Amino acid sequence: MNLSFWYENWQGILTAFVVGTTLLALLLGRRAPDMAMLGAVIVLLASGVLSPAEALSGMSNEGMLTVAALFVVATAVHRTGALALVIDRGLGRPHSLHEAQVRTMTIPAVLSGFMNNTPVVALMVPAVRTWAHKHQLSISKILMPMNDAVVLGGLCTLIGTSTNIVVSGLLNEKTGMSLGMFDITWLGVPLLIVGFAYILVASKSQWLLKDRRPAVSAGDDPREYSLEMVVEPGSPLAGRTIEQAGLRGLHGLFLMEVDRAGHVRAAVEPTERLEEGDRLVFVGVVDSVVELQKIRGLRPATDQVFQLDGPRSERTLLEAVVSNTCPLVGRTIREGQFRSTYDAVIIAVARNGERLRKKIGDIILQPGDTLLLEASPRFLKRQKTNRDFYLVSEVKGAKPPRHDLAWIACTILVAMVLAATLELVPMVAAALVAAAAMVATGCIGPNEARKSIEWETLLLIAASFGLARAIEKTGLDELLAQSTIGAAGDRPYLVLAAIYFVTMIFTETMSNNAAAVLIFPIAWQTASDLGLNPMPFIMAITVAASCGFASPLGYQTNLMVYGPGGYKFSDYLRFGGPLNLIVMVITIILAPLIWPF
């Protein structure tokens, strides 16, 4: 190659190098994914391959804005406890990881057939994460299988994913005919069944799907709190057994006794039925104590909780260690009038691994006791420098749910899904309006809404659009497509395989919809030149553009489980790569049988 070739094609060569280097960095995990992607876009911007508008185009992309709004909606639904109740009832209590995977894959996969994949994953992630923690399950063994099942489920109907609708629109432009609601079902259902089988088998392998739980988990916390809870009047737990109420399923929690109208029952059996007014004495680690606070129909036994200023939803749980100079040392919690002194209420007490067998009000405070307090956020600021306590810190994710607003959150959620599914408004508009409604109705506070947005995920999505634009602008996409399809010659199955493969590669490195739009005209013209029915090629594009399992960039829901699952780039390649090939082979075999050449 002479110098003129390098000079004329330097932008394409540089883009190929940058994209390759970025993918290698993501694979090796040497840099944070969002920083690696942003670095690639910055290099292309600085070199002049991308203009500022092109480099930043992803920041205003509908997909990114939709995901941002859905984070707020999902957190609001989770915050009111609405989805957690549905998840607990729907998923139940699994007896094994395999059973848990089946349950968390089946329900979302069915849902994804009738609503867009993105809101399904956005809503399921926080609820499933809580459910998995409650049942001591590895979240990394659940989220990726669930996400892949959702993507496969979206292939079963026209409205299951936006890619199906995009391809249908492209077909309409060419022929005046669109895909029917269930045209793709003949191909989608076999893919879903085989995909399910692969996921369940592959997830048993520690190499294909690693357990990404930290070496030290929350359940290893040596502090054991003692606390009292009471079954509220009208509680949905009344009449249910201890087992049915989920009070035996929390890791690191032990129901020590039940006080019913002054009669204490120790060593409570799982079949014991709860009654209104029962006072339950628990001992357990802080995470389990926090989960107890979120169960509808249970409240702290101390009535002083309701004498604090402001609604419970605006308070938080904090841990404070009693110092030897605290004036309440040597006195019982009831005598010390803790609430009046500090404007906070003691929910539970931990003492150096000792199991306290007294009711909260009768516990005599000692130096070194760790108190779990319910208080307003102002308590943290006031007491951080107070010598009465050695340490004061907030317990993350411990705000009591707004059960009273659950019906409002569910109504907003259903309205959003219906508006988007019936195409009354674009998905981005439905999501943004729903997020605004959640804040306006108090289902989530403004500050909490800001914190709910996972900015690393959004930066990844935005940067991926910049890279995709560079690949398209420099002609790398067309070069790869033409050379790969050209190598297949005039053999229909090889051409179909080439079109699928190129679409799949584009899906893994750019927007799935962009991949479908880029390859559609090439596939249509190829089928026309060979005198073949274009439908097998169109269906191959539809499947390949959605099924990007081998990288977090392959589909935006892949990115949504990246952080919560604690995954690395290589996890997607190991687990999703074989699934990509399986789906590809089945599509190449079945598509011509359903829609003959």
Image: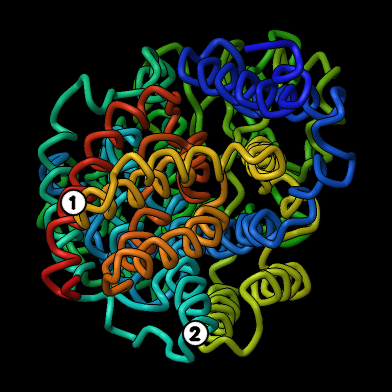
Q: Residue at x 36, y 18 (%)?
A: 220
The x, y position of residue 104, in whole percent, is 26, 54
| Category of crowding for the residue at label 1, using alpha-carbon neighbours closer than 10 angstroms: few (below 14), some (14–19), many (at least 20) | many
The x, y position of residue 529, in whole percent, is 37, 65
**Residue type indicated by callout 2:** Asn
The x, y position of residue 511, in whole percent, is 56, 50
User: Is residue 319 visible from the viewing direction of this image?
Assistant: yes
* Residue 172 tag number: 2
Q: Nearer the viewer, residue 143 or 475?
A: 475
Asked where in the image residue 567 lies, by quadrant, the reply is top left
Tell me the residue that label 1 is attached to. 195
Q: Please indicate whether residue 586 sits to the left or right of residue 301 in the image.
A: left
Residue 219's place in the image compared with 196, above or below, is above
Q: CA distance from mark 1 to mark 2?
A: 30 Å
Q: Secondary structure at mark 2?
A: helix
Q: Residue at x 52, y 79 (%)?
A: 169
Q: Earlier in the sequence, mark 1 or mark 2?
A: 2
